[in-house]
Amino acid sequence: MARIEALDAERLVLALAHLRRVDARLARVIDAHGPCTLAPRGDPYRYLVRSILYQQLAGKAAATIERRFKAGFAGRIPAPDVLAVQRATKLRKFGLSRQKAAAVKAVGAAFANGLVSARRIPHLADDAIVTAVTQIRGVGEWTAHMLLMFSLGRPDVLPVGDYGVRKGAQKLYGLRDLPKPDALAQLAEPWRPFRTVGSWYLWRALEIATPE
């Protein structure tokens, strides 16, 4: 099974040229902010565990919990089979809520028992990955989209449920309300096959002033 190509320096150059050509407003954000720094981080298992640790927490608080969590396992995220059998009471001592303790154990179990395979994931289509990982307790569509974008570097992901992307679109295109998923998908249709990069610049649109 062939590996599906991820974003790399060459594809980012192609993406910026394409986005500038098809979307004048996004082009101004690209010019104001500069090159996209997205790069695949790999290791979908550890990315999912970290995503759960960071869910609904400010960065500093989440980093503290991650540090405590890793300290309980010799300074690293434990292997799936190790995490799957941990007692929830131990995990909660690191600061995880009951729900997060159950969710990280579920991630460990899914990778340990083969429900999700770290070896196979890079070869699967985006939709197949979303279907696979959202079977895991505590992993929803938003987390799956972040996995595709930041762990695997897939070039054409549009996280329609992400508040920052929706807010960036509202600001950049002068919309009265936050765009609903269907409206955001229609707006981003010209960006294909580089909607990941377009989404990244919508986050940047919230950080900089964009001239009309």
Image (tube, rainbow, N blue to C red):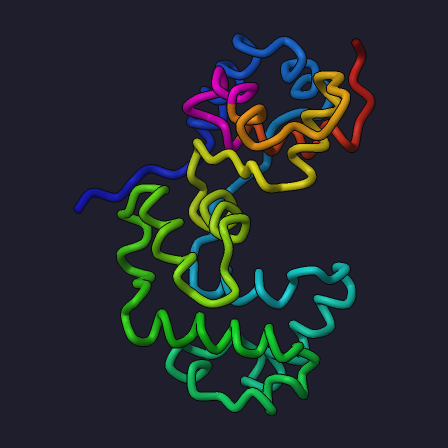
Instruction: Please determine whether, in this image, residue 22 is positioned above or below residue 94.
Output: above
Residue at 63% x, 9% y is 24
Q: Locate the C terminus and report the quarter of the image it occupies.
A: top right
Displayed quadrant of residue 66? bottom right
Image location (x, y in percent) of residue 55: 65, 61
Image location (x, y in percent) of residue 41: 49, 51
Instruction: Please determine whether, in this image, residue 207 is positioned above or below residue 142.
Output: above
Image location (x, y in percent) of residue 187: 56, 19
Work out whether residue 186 or residue 11 is closer to the camera in this orientation and state it.
186
Residue at 43% x, 88% y is 85
Instruction: Please determine whether, in this image, residue 43 is positioned above or below residue 69.
Output: above
Q: Is residue 18 left or right of residue 31?
A: left
Q: Which residues are magenta?
A: 186-196
Image location (x, y in percent) of residue 172: 72, 20
Residue at 53% x, 53% y is 143
Displayed quadrant of residue 88? bottom right
Q: Does the magenta-highlighted stretch encompass residue 187?
A: yes
Q: Residue furthest left?
A: 1
Q: Is residue 138 left or right of residue 67?
A: left
Q: Does the magenta-highlighted stretch encompass residue 43?
A: no
Q: Disc count in the image?
A: 0
What is the chief secondary structure element of the magenta stretch? helix
Residue at 76% x, 31% y is 206
Displayed quadrant of residue 7? top left
Work out whether residue 135 or residue 40 is closer to the camera in this orientation and state it.
135
